[in-house]
Image (spheres, helix red, strand yellow):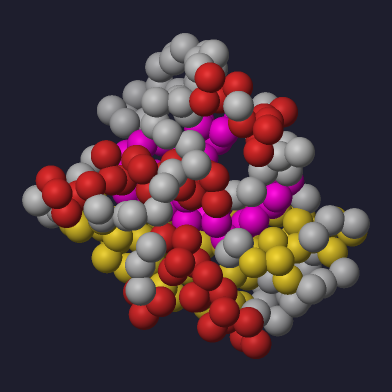
Amino acid sequence: MNIRIGFGWDSHAFKPGVPLKIGGLTIDHPEGLAGHSDGDVLLHAITDALLGAVSAGDIGSFFPPGDPRWKDADSSIFLNLALEEIRNAGYRILNIDTTLVLSAPKIGPIAAELREHVADLLNIDPSDVGIKAKTPEGLNVDHVAQAHAVVLLEKVDDPEARSTASSRPAFASRSSIRKTSRSHSAGTVRALPSWPASSAVLDWPALFP
Ligand code: MG
């Protein structure tokens, strides 16, 4: 199969006293999104879409929400892990499309900047990134931000091209971040070992002083 599709969805409630992070950008707004990490709902949805496209599980299977190592973590860490997963599977991103659902702030004025930033995080062209936004009319969830993401991947035949499909260095390597509780890759649920005590993992807290 030369192409694969992936879908991701996430939601976070708004919470006062924390910065609002969406798509890796810090957005000026009275409230941020609650979460164990930085609550970046858009990057979480894209991460799940990437992982889903290569049947690699989901964000929670790599980064359990209760683990103190991911407290207030920058969600680009999660995204980089997913990028490494698709690279290891031999795929690269063709394009992604996303929809944010939230009542405020207005995304339109910052959509272009968001698109540029997400494209930079994914190491793809901004023309291959869709950023759309809707208000949650009729859903009665005005204090929640939701994000939907779809990705399309293409098989990379040339091993050399595969290795450079994303030149962005991964914060977390596949060898240091392992799924802890379940695997979806074969459509089954099975127990996996608990967190490896590798030096790479033990070094993580130093990144989040
Ligand atoms: Mg999330």
Is residue 106 left or right of 187 when viewed as pictured? right
Q: Can residue 201 be seen in this view?
A: yes
Q: Is residue 139 visible?
A: no
Q: Note whether 193 is above or below 181 in the view shown.
A: above
Q: Note whether 17 is above or below 113 in the view shown.
A: above
Image: magenta residue range: 35-64
Residue 172 lies, in percent from the top left, at 48, 37
As drawn, the residue found furthest toward the right would be 17
Q: Does the magenta stretch include residue 152?
A: no
Q: Which residue is drawn at 60% across and 27% down?
A: 203
Q: Which residue is drawn at 34% across and 40% down?
A: 85
Residue 93 lies, in percent from the top left, at 30, 60
Is residue 12 left or right of 4 when viewed as pictured? right
Q: Does the magenta stretch include residue 47?
A: yes
* In-front residue for pair 156/209: 209
Residue 44 lies, in percent from the top left, at 55, 51
> Which quarter of the picture shows residue 143?
bottom right
Is residue 78 left or right of 3 when viewed as pictured? right
Name the quadrant of the C terminus: top right
> Which quarter of the picture shows residue 119?
bottom left
Is residue 96 left or right of 60 when viewed as pictured? left
Q: Note whether 84 is above or below 198 in the view shown.
A: below
As drawn, the residue found furthest toward the bottom would be 109
> Which quarter of the picture shows residue 63?
top right
Q: Residue at x 84, y 64 (%)?
A: 31
